[in-house]
Image (cartoon, rainbow, N blue to C red):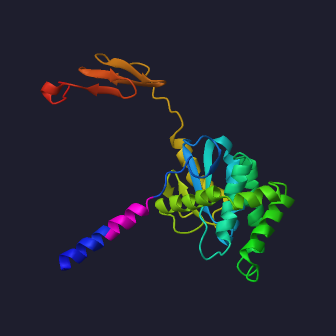
Amino acid sequence: MQITSIFILIAVTFASFTLAQVPIPSRPDGWGVGGPADAHAVIEMFLDPLCPDCKATWSTILEVVQAYGTKIHFRIHTFPLPYHTNSFVVSQGVHVVANATTRNLDAIFQYVTQVFQYQQLWSNDATKSMTMTQVIDSLASFVDKIGIVTKDKFLAGIASDDLNEETRISWKYACSRGIVGTPTFLINGVATSADASWSLADWKSVIDPILSSNEEISSEVKTCPSGQVECTYAPHKTQCCLKGERCITNVGCRCFNLKNGNKCF
C-alpha cells in the first residue's frame, strides 16, 4: 500500500510538471530597441505596468537607451503581479498595442511610458468600486485619447483569446527565467541588483566595461623571432608559432602531435 501511494505521488508530480511546461512562443518574448538582439550588452527589464517601482526606474532606463543607442539592446517583458488587481489586463494592453500596430516599437514604448505616468488611474484603490468591464473601458478610452490605438481596436484586442494567451505565455516565460518580482533587470542573461536607486552613472559603470571588453584589440606581431612562424589567425590578430605548432584559423598557434601527447618537441 505504501509503495502504491508513493508511485501515485510520483506520477501526479510528474504529470503536474509536464502540464506546467512553458508553451514555445511564436516569436522571442518581449520587445527590444537599440542594437541587435545579439549586441555585446543586452539588458532585459521584466516589468509590471502598475508597479510603482517600475515607474520609478523608467525615466532612467529611457536615459540609458538614449545614451547608448545601437551599442546595446534593451528589451522589455510583461510580468503582471497578482496583487495589482488590474495588472494583467494592463499588461495585455502592451500585447494589444503591439498587435494592432504591427509591433511598432514607438507605439509600444509610448503605451508603457504613458501608463506609468498615469498608473494611479488603475490602482487598486482607484478602481475598488469599478467592475473589470469599467476598468477595461477606462484603459481603452485612455489609449484612444493619446492616439496610440482606437478604442474599438483596443477593446477587440483585450477580448482576443489569442492575445490573452500570449500575455499568459509571457508571464510563464518570465517564471521560467526565475523572475519573481518587478522590476527585474538581466544583463546578458544575468540578474542584477538594479533598481530605482540606480542613476545613469550607475548603469554606465556596469555597461561600459562590457562594451570595452569587446572592443577590437590588435594583437598583430610585427616581427617573429628566428625559428618561429608568423600566424595571422584572424583580422588584426597575429601570433608567432613555435616549432611543431600549426596556425589554426580563429584559434592561433596550436600543437597537434598525438604520438607525443600533443607536445611540440
Q: Which residues are magenta?
A: 12-21
Instruction: Note whether 216 is above or below 46 in the view shown.
Output: above
Position of residue 255 measured from the top left corner of the image (x, y, whole percent): 25, 26
Instruction: Note whether 217 is above or below 13 in the view shown.
Output: above
- Does residue 18 belong to the magenta stretch? yes
For the question of whether residue 235 can be seen, the reply is yes
For the question of whether residue 57 can be seen, the reply is no
Q: Residue at x 42, y 62 (%)?
A: 19
Is 245 situated left or right of 184 in this image?
A: left
- Which image quarter is the C terminus in? top left
Magenta residues, dominant SS class: helix
Position of residue 176 measured from the top left corner of the image (x, y, whole percent): 47, 60
Q: Residue at x 52, y 68 (%)?
A: 180
Is 263 situated left or right of 45 in this image?
A: left
Q: Of residues 129 and 210, which is closer to you in this image?
A: 129
Is 184 situated left or right of 52 in this image?
A: left
Q: Residue furthest left?
A: 259
Position of residue 133 measured from the top left corner of the image (x, y, whole percent): 75, 72
Instruction: Note whether 21 is above or below 35 in the view shown.
Output: below
Res 143 → quadrant: bottom right
Position of residue 77 measured from the top left corner of the image (x, y, whole percent): 60, 57
Q: Residue at x 55, y 58 (%)?
A: 169
